[in-house]
Image (spheres, rainbow, N blue to C red):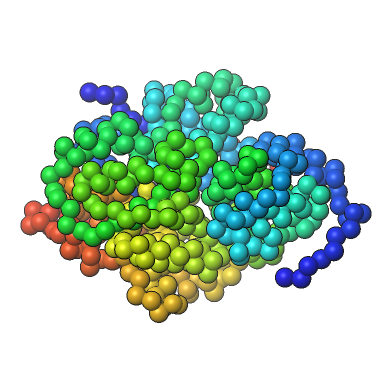
Amino acid sequence: MQRELKFQREANPEWARQVSERPGGEGVFSCLQCGACSGTCPLSIYMDFGPRRIIALVREGFRKDALSSQTIWLCASCYSCTVHCPRQIHITDIMYGLKREAIQERLYPRRFAVPILAQEFCAMVRRNGRSSEFWLVLRMALRSNPFILFGMMRTGWDLLRTGRLSLRRERIRDVSALPRQEVA
Amino acid sequence: MPAAYGYFPGCSLKGTGVAYEESLLTLFRLLELPLAELDDWNCCGATSYMSIDERSAFQLSARNFALAHKANHRDLIAPCSACYLVLRKTQDYVERYPQTGREIAASMGNGSLKVFQSVRVRHPLEVLYTDVGPGEIRKRMVRPWRGGRVACYYGCQMVRPYGEADRDHDPTRMDELLAAVEAPTVPFSLKTKCCGGSLTGTTHEVGVRLNYILLKEAARKGAQAIATACPLCQYNLDAYQHEIRRATGERLEMPILYFTQILGWALGGDRAALGFQRAISGRREIAQWFPKSPAGKRAEKEAYV
């Protein structure tokens, strides 16, 4: 990866403060940059920035870099960083906050399947109260890259013959009690 | 008769993780512990919902808590690690931010934090370990173990950071329960390393590689099977072994079992009622270790819908 020189004028300290004021973001300025998070993260080797560098970007206020990174979408929410952090920073929750902001601002990488899955999952649960795995995967594939469906055929067949692939659309009875969308 | 445990299955246990539900219900029946499924429960929101809308994500949990509260469940068993974590995280959140908690509760028609606090969310591993205990399970064992060595894989979300199912990075309760039914376990240093969750569906190569590392390490430690306690871990480890073999050329094939299947078998559960026929990988080993009985064959036909 190409290293970039960052300049103070690109930074947005106001945004850093906002992140630190969100629930879970409290500890961001106390980060030691020790790297325990990136060391324990099972996915850091696939990320453009590891969690340590994401925290560094956040507290310096490099908003766009943090929000458009692949890192936040590769985070599988295993909370390993959170329990390892010597400052008890809720890194996973900070990642969630960045994901939400990236979705709102449409800064996520295009056609990247993770945010698409999140959106489709959320829409499905909003409508029906439950997720139906088969339909969810289908919708995700159609919106990101339909060709991945070919690669899934063998697994789909395995699930079908073992009785693990349900084609039912799950739905709760009392859908009116589900939370509604607040922001458009 | 003790009060029934509330049971929150979650979406996976009705789909790809159906063997987990089958074996859990069978095991609890064998232990004479009543389970009552939460009526009209909704999805916990898992990791995806939280990535879109935090408030609604907590409202989803609030509805489940309200249902459990109404049904008078003091304990709510959530076998899926994601459900377990999300429900407990919600409780932790409303405790740390009571004002937001009250707002969330109010938006769901009840402005009191009691709704969240009256229920204890529990993982079956912890219930079986503390409420039943390895000693009692050993006493009830009717079948000796005929299988191979097992690596106990706890996965990530069950043990961190809101859980009380076991210790963060060195959980041992599954090993102890399996030892109680004489299933030999191997030390497994990756036992809480993440399986990637939904990444096998989204960034496939990355997700499969994480599982390759887990399988390879388990095999290196001498394990012939892996025991899991989460539907997503089981699915990820089970469903992509053929791809891993093709990509690496290594002979890695092992059964991925639920710990409830192993315990249920030791306690005399029926093969089909424990969902062994749902396995994708290691079917030959499973057929050897958990053989069909003549009576079981008939039952299997009936149970297999």
Placement of the C terminus of chain B among the 4 image quadrants: bottom left
Frontmost residue, B108 versus A159: A159
Q: Is residue A41 above or below residue A182?
A: below
Which residue is drawn at the image coordinates 81% and 49% (left, top)?
A: A60
Q: Is residue B45 above or below residue B237?
A: above
Position of B113 compared to B72: left or right?
right
User: Is residue B23 in view?
Assistant: no
Which residue is drawn at the image coordinates 53% and 30% (left, top)?
A: B91
**Residue B97, image quadrant:** top right
Frontmost residue, B71 versus B161: B161
Q: Position of residue B96 (x, y in %)?
A: 62, 28
User: Is residue B144 in view?
Assistant: yes
Q: Position of residue B217 (x, y in %)?
A: 41, 63
Placement of the N terminus of chain B among the 4 image quadrants: top left
Position of A105 compared to B146: left or right?
right
Q: Position of residue B283 (x, y in %)?
A: 25, 66
Which residue is drawn at the image coordinates 29% and 63% (left, top)?
A: B224
Q: Is residue B132 above or below residue B27?
A: above
In the picture as drawn, the residue positioned furthest to the left comes out as B294
Q: Is residue B295 above or below residue B57?
A: below
Frontmost residue, B170 versus B178: B170
Q: Position of residue A26 (x, y in %)?
A: 71, 37
